[in-house]
Image (spheres, rainbow, N blue to C red):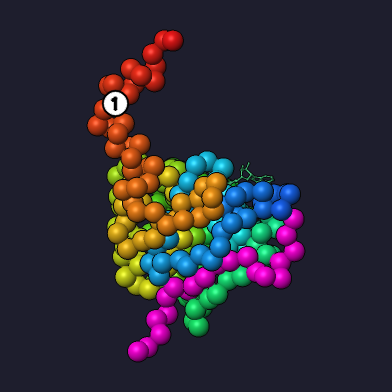
């Protein structure tokens, strides 16, 4: 049986030889300290968890270990790494026998800076700054090409619910063209993607969870089904 090209990243763990200071960031984050061996899905892997659980820290480290800029973009973005944690140097990545044809790190919080860089080097016309935040995000996703590795940090940050559905459809098309995604998200819409592994980051490390067992699904469904009562409870005077 032929070995499949995907996943491009097959395993993620802390290297045995890494020098680790458990008293300082990022190893003070339980999910980082106790990550074990992560085996990403060939299609889509989601990182979920409470704010501050360590999703962006790990995604950034994977991106930098893959040669991508910490602020986001492709390998063609040559900017100094910004405030990058030491984690990338401690990771052991087991990769596919074939490199992805293209790779991109989409980071919601710093995409604006990446667009400014692209304007400075004049490599893209028209400027992404002439697009709305969500339109520019969607443009980036729609420009992804076959055979790629895509690391997305909260891509839903700028996307309307309709655009999140469109992003889901675009991701599915790309998965069918040999792409692999690792996505940190809080979006129940994105998390519903069926060919995926959902990894929950919490105080005990990183564990796989089913879509309907995520807090994102449960809290959103409960709120939408009962929002008059929930609002009454939330906004009640004591
Ligand atoms: N440079 C830094 N130095 C020290 N601590 C940091 C640094 N950057 C992040 N942290 C802390 O590390 C923890 C994990 O942050 P991270 O951004 O990875 O969380 P996250 O799961 O992506 O959260 P969110 O869902 O809010 O994006 C947080 O408690 C954060 O305050």
Q: Is residue 97 visible?
A: yes
Q: Residue furthest bottom?
A: 1
**Residue at 74% in and 49% down:** 23
Task: State which quadrant residue 6 falls in.
Answer: bottom left
Q: Nearer the viewer, residue 94 or 122?
A: 94
Q: Position of residue 10 (x, y in %)?
A: 49, 72
| Above or below, 156 relative to 16 | above
**Residue at 71% in and 66% down:** 18
Q: Nearer the viewer, residue 172 or 92?
A: 92
Quadrant including the C terminus: top left
Magenta span = 1-21
Report if the beta carbon of the residue with label 1 is closer than 8 angstroms to ligand 1: no
Q: Residue furthest left?
A: 225
Residue 155 appears left or right of 80:
left
Task: State which quadrant residue 195 falls in.
Answer: bottom left
Looking at the rendering, the quadrant in which ligand 1 lies is top right
Main secondary structure of the magenta stretch: loop
Q: Is residue 55 visible?
A: no
Q: What residue would you read off at disc 1?
A: 227
Element under label 1?
helix
Q: Position of residue 234 (x, y in %)?
A: 39, 20
Q: Residues within 10 Å of mark 1 (few under 14, many from 20)?
A: few
Q: Residue furthest front?
A: 204
> Total number of numbered labels?
1
**Residue at 35% in and 67% down:** 175
| Above or below, 230 relative to 43 | above
Q: Nearer the viewer, residue 144 or 3?
A: 3
Q: Is residue 19 magenta?
A: yes
**Residue at 58% in and 71% down:** 93
Quadrant including the N terminus: bottom left
Q: Is residue 70 magenta?
A: no
């Amino acid at each position: 049986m032929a070995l499949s090209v995907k996943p491009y990243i097959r395993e993620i763990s802390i290297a045995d030889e890494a020098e680790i200071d458990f008293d300082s960031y990022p190893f003070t984050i339980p999910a980082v300290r106790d990550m074990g061996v992560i085996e990403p899905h060939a299609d889509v892997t989601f990182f979920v968890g409470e704010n501050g659980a360590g999703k962006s820290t790990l995604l950034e480290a994977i991106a930098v270990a893959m040669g991508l800029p910490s602020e986001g973009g492709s390998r063609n973005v040559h900017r100094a790494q910004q405030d990058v944690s030491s984690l990338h140097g401690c990771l052991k990545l087991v990769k596919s026998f074939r490199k992805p044809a293209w790779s991109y790190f989409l980071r919601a919080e710093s995409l604006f800076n990446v667009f400014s860089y692209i304007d400075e080097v004049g490599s893209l016309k028209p400027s992404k700054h002439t697009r709305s935040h969500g339109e520019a995000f969607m443009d980036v996703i729609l420009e992804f090409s076959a055979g790629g590795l895509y690391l997305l940090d909260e891509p839903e940050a700028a996307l309307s619910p309709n655009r999140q559905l469109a992003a889901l459809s675009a991701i599915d098309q790309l998965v069918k063209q040999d792409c692999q995604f690792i996505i940190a998200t809080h979006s129940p819409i994105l998390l519903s993607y069926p060919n995926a592994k959902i990894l929950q980051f919490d105080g005990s490390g990183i564990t796989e969870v089913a879509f309907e067992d995520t807090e994102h699904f449960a809290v959103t469904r409960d709120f939408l089904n009962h929002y008059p009562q929930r609002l009454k409870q939330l906004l009640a005077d004591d």
